Image (cartoon, rainbow, N blue to C red):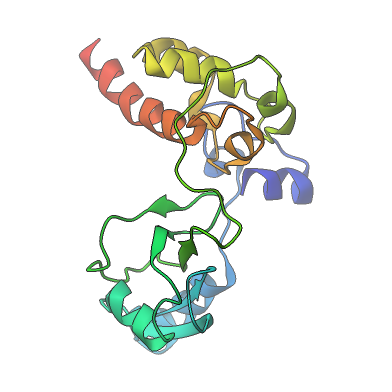
Amino acid sequence: EKQLIRAVTGREIPPGKLPMDIGCVVFNVDTCASLYRAIYRGQPLIKRVVTVSGSAVANPANLLVRIGTSYRELFRICGGFTSEPYKIVTGGPMMGTAQHSLDIPVVKNTSSLLAFAEDGGEESFLDSGVCIRCGRCVSVCPMRLQPTKIYENAVLDRFAECDKLNVRDCIECGCCAYVCPAKLYLVQAMRMAKSQIPREGGKK
């Protein structure tokens, strides 16, 4: 949404601020439709359109499902798996979160569910390497951050330094991790740092 606001309005969200701080609010189409149904029809949010896809899914599809439906049921509706998936992700291939269980329900912000087969073209789990200072992560970051510097401080629990490097502006798009030749867990480090900064500030 930060990129969208900048492209449409020309306004830029300052580090550590939210869209509302510059007079903007961003809603996607589904949220707008849900608001309409809630206000004009008195209908609560009880259904979501969920994309079920990935190289391990037999019949990928977009499904209109009720809130509370388990991930396991979604894969069953799509014909199950063509092979044992090595990774299941919810939330999209770049910004999604890996799941450890299929017994998890669809919630109001569930948008997609992906299952990747190890031989489907995606990379399997690799040990994280060592930063070679190539600068690729810096060149692709849409928020103009320094992912490698943030990563170095995050793994050493120097979260105050991460805050100075504006880690809270990270939109977790995954571009840095995608281009990293060392396969560093950059997005995970960003998430960890962002989760620790408020607590550290509270202690001070």
Q: Is residue 137 above or below residue 157?
A: below
Q: Is residue 1 left or right of residue 90?
A: right
Q: Quadrant of residue 86?
A: bottom left
Residue at 71% from the left image edge and 18% from the top image edge: 134
The answer, for residue 154, to whether it is visible in the render is yes
Using the rendered image of the protein, determine whether residue 46 is visible from the camera's viewpoint: no
Q: Position of residue 173 (x, y in %)?
A: 58, 44
Quadrant (top left, top right, bottom left, bottom right) of the C terminus = top left
Where residue 172 sits in the image (x, y, percent)? 53, 40
Q: Which is more toward the observer, 49 or 177?
A: 177
Query: In the image, residue 143 lies at what x, y percent?
Result: 65, 32
In the image, is residue 22 above or below residue 103? Answer: above
Q: Nearer the viewer, residue 144 or 71?
A: 71
User: Residue at the spot x=52%, y=28% of the render?
Assistant: 184
Residue at (47, 37) in percent of width and height? 126
Relative vertical location of residue 28 with respect to residue 94 in this rendering, above or below: below
Q: Decide if residue 38 is on the left or right side of residue 148.
A: left
Rendered image quadrant of residue 122: bottom right
| Foreground pick, 145 / 137 | 137
Q: Is residue 119 left or right of residue 127?
A: right
Residue 101 picture quarter: bottom left
Q: Residue at 52% across / 49% down in the picture?
A: 95
Whole-percent x, y for residue 58 in the image: 49, 81
Q: Is residue 38 above or below residue 137?
A: below
In this rendering, position of residue 108 left or right of residue 204: right
